[in-house]
Amino acid sequence: MNGARAVHHRWVTTTPPHGVRRQFPRWSQLRPLLRFDLSRTGLQRAPDVAGIRAMARRRVPRAVFDYVDGGAEGEVSLARSRRAFEAVEFRPRILVDVAEPDPSTTILGQPSRMPLVLAPTGFTRLMHYQGEYAAAAAAAGAGVPYTLSTMGTVTPERLAAARSDGADQWFQLYLWRDRGRSIDLVARAREAGFRALVLTVDTPVAGARLRDARNGLSIPPRLTPRTLAGLARHPGWWANLLTTEPLTFASLTDTGGTVAQMVDRVFDPHVTIADLAWLREQWQGPLVVKGAQTAADARRVVDAGADAVIVSNHGGRQLDRAPTPLEELPAVVQEIGDRAEVYVDGGVRTGADVVAAVALGARACLVGRPYLYGLMAGGRAGVARVLDILHADLRRTLALLGTPTLSELSEERVRIR
Ligand SMILES: Cc1cc2nc3c(=O)[nH]c(=O)nc-3n(C[C@H](O)[C@H](O)[C@H](O)COP(=O)(O)O)c2cc1C
C-alpha cells in the first residue's frame, strides 16, 4: 500500500469539523505569497555564523578554508572552547521592560556599539582580496574596534589612509628578534593613528597546524598540480588573487616558506615580562596583552603595566589542550578586574556567547574566525553580515534574559552545566 497516497487521499476527503468551510484560494490571496525578494543575497539568507561558514567553505580553495577553520594538533582546545560556551545555561529575569535592549558599551574608554572587537588575523588577503580593508571598513560600519596584525597583508599606513571617521583601530604586535625593527613598527602604527597596542604573548614558536601541513599551505600560495585543480573549482578566488597586488606580509620583509617556518624565523622566543615593561615605556596609549591563560599571569602583566588582558589561547591554534578561556575568565576577573579590562576570545560564534562572557565578567569578546568566514563568503558585505547577525543576537538575548543593558548582566544570570 502506498502510504503517501493514503495520506493525500485522507487529506482531501476528511470532512472538516462543523464551522470550517473549504474554498479555492483566490489569486489575491496567492499573490503576496509569491513575492520573490531578489534583494536578499545568499549572505542575507544565512541566518547565523554557521551558515556563513558553510558559504565560505564553498567559495575558497580547501587550503584557505582550512587555514582559517583549523587549530593546532588535535584541535582539542578549539572544541573545548565551543563546549564551554554550550555549557552555559541562562537564568532569565521575567517581567522586566526589555523593549529597547542596548548592547552598547565602552572599550578602553571609547564607545562601542557592542562588546566586540575584531581580532588580529594574519594573511587576511588570502581569504578574500579585499582583506583587511574590508574587515576594517565593516568594523567601522558596525561601530566596533578592529585590530590589524603584525602578520597583516596591508601596512598600517595603507589601512590608516582608508580609515573612515571615528573608526577605532588597534595594532597587534609580535616582538621580533630584531627589537629595533619591532619598535620602528610600533612607531609607524602610532604615527598612523592606531589607538591601542596589543602584544600577543602566546606565540614564542609556531603551533603545529596539521591541516596546513597536510595541505602544503605556503606564502604566497604555490601553483602545484593540486592548487591548479582547485583553480578550476574557484576561478573567482584565483582571478582576484592574481589580478590584485601581490599577497605578502606587508610589515615583514623576511617572508617565504610556510607560515610556521616564518614565525619561527622572525619572532623572538626569548621574550619575557621585562620586554613588556620595556614596551610599556615606549607606548603611551592603551596597552593590551593577548594570550594570558591563568589568573597568575594576568596579574604579572597588569603589574608590568598592561591596561587590559585578553584571556585567549589563540583560538586553539598554538598550544593544544591549553586552558579554556571562558573557564579561566572568572578567576582572571577576580584577580585583576578592578585594575584592568578583561576580554576573552576563542569559540565565540553567537551574540549569546558574548552575553555569557560579559555575564562572567568580560568587558568584551574578540572574534577571529567568524569575521573571516564572512570575508571568505562575501568580502566586506560578508563581514558586515556577520556583525549584523551578532548584534541582532545580542539584542535578542538581552531581551529574552530580562537584562536590557550590559550593566545589568552578572554571574547570577548564568549557570554552568
Ligand atoms: C586565520 C587566523 C589568523 C590569526 N592570526 C593572528 C595574528 O596574526 N595575531 C594574533 O595575535 N592572533 C591571530 N589569530 C588569533 C585571533 O586573534 C583570535 O585569538 C582567535 O581567532 C580567536 O578565536 P576564534 O577564531 O574562535 O574567534 C589568528 C586567528 C586566525 C583564525
Image: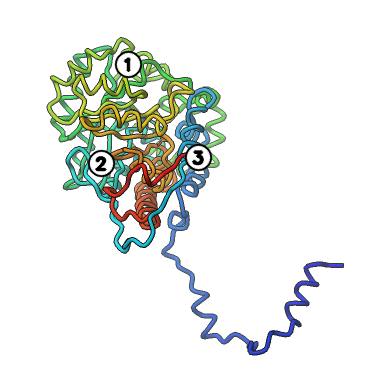
Q: Is mark 3 within 8 Å of ligand 1?
A: no
Question: Label 1 crowding class (10 Å Cα cut-off): few <14, some 14-19, many 20+?
Answer: some
Q: Quadrant of residue 317?
A: top left
Packing grade of label 2 (10 A; few <14, some 14-19, many >=20) is many
Residue mark closest to the camera, 1 vs 3: 3
Residue at horizontal 39 percent and vertical 15 percent from the top? 205
Does 224 appear above or below 416? above
According to the image, label 3 marks what residue? 417
- How far apart are the alpha carbons under marks 2 and 1? 25 Å
Apparent side of residue 150 relative to residue 322 in the rendered image (left or right): left
How busy is the neighbourhood of tag 3: few (under 14 within 10 Å), some, or many (20 plus)?
A: few
What numbered label is drawn on residue 267? Answer: 1
* Lower sequence index among marks 2 and 1: 2
- Horizontal and vertical percent for residue 239? 43, 41
Q: Are marks 1 and 3 in contact (CB under 8 Å)?
A: no
Q: Could you say where residue 276 lies in the image, as x and y percent from the top left?
A: 22, 18
- Residue 406 lies left or right of residue 39; in this view the side is left
Q: Amino acid at mark 3?
A: Arg
Q: Is mark 2 within 8 Å of ligand 1?
A: no
Is the Cβ of the residue at disc 3 closer than 8 Å to that at disc 2? no
Q: Is residue 176 above or below residue 313?
A: above
Question: Can you tell which quarter of the image residue 121 is in?
Answer: top left
From the image, tell me which residue sits under label 2: 145
Residue for point 77% across, 77% down: 10
Mark 1 / mark 3, whichever is N-terminal? 1
Image spot of residue 288 (x, y percent): 24, 29
Mark number, residue 181 = none
Location of ligand 1 given as a quarter of the image = top left
Mark 3 / mark 2, whichever is N-terminal: 2
Provide the secondary structure element on which disc 3 rests. Answer: loop
Residue 93 x/y as whole percent: 38, 55
Q: Residue furthest right?
A: 1
